[in-house]
Image (cartoon, coloured by chain):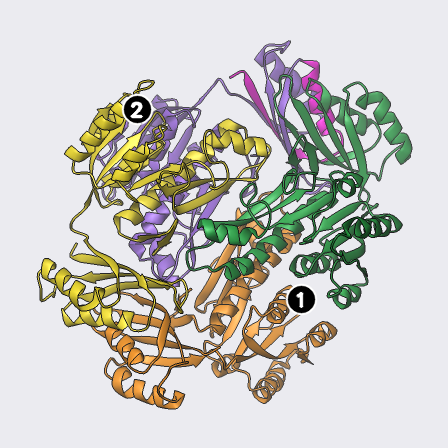
Chain colours: A purple, B orange, C yellow, D green
Amino acid sequence: MDEARLLITCPDRPGIVAAVSGFLYAHGANITELQQHSTDPEGGTFFMRLAFTLRHLDLSRPALERAFREVVAERFAMAWRIAYASERKRVAVLVSKPAHALLELLWRYRVGELPMDLRLVISNHPHHREEVERFGVAYHHVPVAAGGKEEAEERMLALLEAGGVEVVVLARYMQVLSPRFVARYPMRILNIHHSFLPAFAGADPYRQAHERGVKLIGATAHYVTEELDGGPIIEQDVVRVSHRHSVAEMRRLGRELERTVLARAVRWHLEDRILVHGNKTVVFV
Amino acid sequence: MDEARLLITCPDRPGIVAAVSGFLYAHGANITELQQHSTDPEGGTFFMRLAFTLRHLDLSRPALERAFREVVAERFAMAWRIAYASERKRVAVLVSKPAHALLELLWRYRVGELPMDLRLVISNHPHHREEVERFGVAYHHVPVAAGGKEEAEERMLALLEAGGVEVVVLARYMQVLSPRFVARYPMRILNIHHSFLPAFAGADPYRQAHERGVKLIGATAHYVTEELDGGPIIEQDVVRVSHRHSVAEMRRLGRELERTVLARAVRWHLEDRILVHGNKTVVFV
Amino acid sequence: MDEARLLITCPDRPGIVAAVSGFLYAHGANITELQQHSTDPEGGTFFMRLAFTLRHLDLSRPALERAFREVVAERFAMAWRIAYASERKRVAVLVSKPAHALLELLWRYRVGELPMDLRLVISNHPHHREEVERFGVAYHHVPVAAGGKEEAEERMLALLEAGGVEVVVLARYMQVLSPRFVARYPMRILNIHHSFLPAFAGADPYRQAHERGVKLIGATAHYVTEELDGGPIIEQDVVRVSHRHSVAEMRRLGRELERTVLARAVRWHLEDRILVHGNKTVVFV
Amino acid sequence: MDEARLLITCPDRPGIVAAVSGFLYAHGANITELQQHSTDPEGGTFFMRLAFTLRHLDLSRPALERAFREVVAERFAMAWRIAYASERKRVAVLVSKPAHALLELLWRYRVGELPMDLRLVISNHPHHREEVERFGVAYHHVPVAAGGKEEAEERMLALLEAGGVEVVVLARYMQVLSPRFVARYPMRILNIHHSFLPAFAGADPYRQAHERGVKLIGATAHYVTEELDGGPIIEQDVVRVSHRHSVAEMRRLGRELERTVLARAVRWHLEDRILVHGNKTVVFV
């Protein structure tokens, strides 16, 4: 729990690793994980994630961050942030009728696989209240009436704000969020789409997959942007199907995929393993 | 080698299995494999593949086929055919510069994994002649000049006809075939497309995949129809990639996929395991 | 729900399919699925699973079974049984501390993915009572004291008998069952072992896997026999690991595998898709 | 081609990354890849692989290595080495009758996927001479007579020495190498075993797999040690099988696996991506 993570994006040039690791070493921060990626060593973009322990730090956290900015970050024109494992992210889950993805998150939350502070669940259906409250999590039913999306989103944003929510997970939430809503949580809304994107974006992807006669079906976790099902992909997986699988059976198989793929993406987000660059992700796992 | 395969498509209704298996038993044909599929037991379409041995047949092949038509097929309004393992299909491979899919087919052909009579290889490039001729297979270089596609296709069709070719395999052949060409080999031209269709149809799919930032890349074997990359899918597979994979590395990984997926599809076609229905396939493996 | 399944094992010889399908057709049983397998067409063993609808049956169920025995089964020396989808199997789950496999079964049961009558859960720990009772299922805590296994098994067998249990699922039940217990439910006790058997049988397989440095870890669902982790394998799957995975992380990944693999095996058992032959299974999916 | 790779194993303690990256930066070596792993930040073992460009190096290679030893390596008690991409490793392939793994390596070698200097192929069979020589590689037939293994190994060692061979790849070489032979190439002999080790070590693993009734078959690439099929595992993969797969069909499927798994392991070895620690590998991919 005394782990911190430093995430960096900057123009690539020699000396970055030396500068960052030298700085951390000088202040007693022991590096436990280090991953880096460069799109091109000549003139590309450089990404890095370092995990380090705070135990022997010779500075306070604010002093560390200030010193890092002055000594290292400005020199290399870095976009950067430090996240602390002890400050668990405050999360809200949005869900419609199908409960499988929600339940998967709740269960993993309970056994400690998802290091978050799950503040609330919002649904446009009343069904999951009992289930959610059993896990000690607040449940809010925010119906979306025809023509009432703006009002519903207002209510939801108020709930998110009241809960201090930092991350929103769409666990099969079937309403399209407005650009205004999305803009409030840039690269902090995760969605699970039940197809192998970019194939079968939009509605009823299993039916689309069945009609096209594909031999694998997939699920995609991605950040939500203004473009429907078009945001940066975090994780994908597939499962084999054949002519014998009806749409209903694809849905059954797909539920397994959706649960697993979303849970992975959420965990990586919570552990600060994802850097977004343009419309793509760098995932350090 | 004394195996025959009976393939049936017909409206579903009670009694088909009993009629077909009863007929075969009565004539000494011992069933060794039987697979069936129904899109819907009430009013759907019924598909069946039976493999049987000819050893104890009490009729000649033509007599068997005639009797089957009269006694069984007409009663159930069947589309059907019988194929004999001893009559290996005559195959041509079309290929452009990348040799990996061609080589895979040649190797598997030589070790007996692909029960075909490989008559010729046609390429719009001269490069693979030596390699192909080593395997004892004729190589024809048919360049496609700008504006000269019709002429090239004429030459190719003449070569295919002269070779008595029944099946055409596009092992990374980069020219789009004309509808006229395709119509000559309906559901008998197999192509390998280097993406997980329907995602990334068209040109340079690995570049498209890289730009979209997908986490899996795929390959798709399908029958060629008039619609580019739109024909019935036979087989697909995927491999995991990450931000670390450049387009070139995706191509390297993709080569493995393409080889495997195409080889599977070709084998299934040669073993009469594929039934086409609308724009989809029933593959009995 | 008016589906029946006929499962057959017998010496292979010509005419079986014709006899069985002819019999069913004659009595108004419409075949909806048919799968067969032969270890060797000459002198091998023949396996078949037929699903058929009872709607237009011209006999009662007992009369159908009697007629089948007399007209078909005896002629071909068949081991056979007919199962009816409407008669859902009565199931008990045995579990120790880890709850993931149990919860997976409960969820799938509730959403209708597992067509069973879940009568009771037995655990040597008291922990899961609340969770299980929420699903409307009886929970029995049967502790196993040192030297008290025989007594505990007596209690468990009494509970199973009182519940009319036909199938026992070990969802990470950490006690080895005695041969006497096993003999009461031959090929009707399913276990999930957290390794890719036959590798890492016995205790703490993730630790064994970590020590051996394997690059994939697995899970295996199998029928329980007298030989520990040695019974017929029903289903297996694997997930990739690397040097970065500690034993704890292997356990986390393994939980996903165990849940999925066990759920598949249980569903196949409930749908009468598994035939056991020697120490192997024929699974018709 | 002006890439170098620095591989380090040492006791873990703070400051290693800073010292190494600072050293390289000071001498104009631009880091392009950096991966590290620690078995335990407190008292564990630390592994690192750095790739860097030599273009702007301010020292000769020998001077760089000497300086690294004195300034960094001794301070941290490192086991280390620097490998240069331009110095392609000299490789020999040993093979028996089955050619698939050999051909895979030859083909990848030719298209540039395996950056090695393939000096010779040795076989206890004469069959593959023509094939190998076509690729411009020397072929040596060294039969192993009954009781003549020692003599055969002497001949093989002489050939390897004459070729300056650094790495030996067993591409389905069916003779067990003596401890004496193995000791000459410690962690430099790679083998492909046709099972998912540790399951089915020893002879005829596909038959063993068939008899046990597993639902997945595998292949394992590992370093050869004195213990048969017991050396550090480099890579593994599996493919799904069912009751329908005979031993012959498992062999056919297995060939695909063996080719792919061995090719991956060889490439990783050639690119200096593998560190051996005890009986396990750290593979930085």
Residue C94 picture quarter: top left
The residue where tag 2 is placed is: C149
Q: Residues within 10 Å of mark 2 (few under 14, many from 20)?
A: some
Residue at (21%, 70%) from the top-left corner?
B43
The residue where tag 1 is placed is: B99
Image: magenta residue range: A1-27
Residue at (76%, 64%) from the top-left corner?
D126
Report helix, strand or loop for mark 2. Answer: helix
Residue C230 at x, y = what percent? 42, 41
Eyeballing the image, is A50 above or below B194?
above
| Dot 1 amino acid type | Ala
Residue C119 at x, y = what percent? 19, 35
Q: Nearer the viewer, residue D65 or C142?
A: C142
Residues flagged by tags 1 and 2 on a common chain: no
Q: Nearer the viewer, residue B165 or A101?
A: B165
Residue B2 at x, y = what percent? 46, 79
Residue C59 in view in this figure: yes
Chain at tag 1:
B
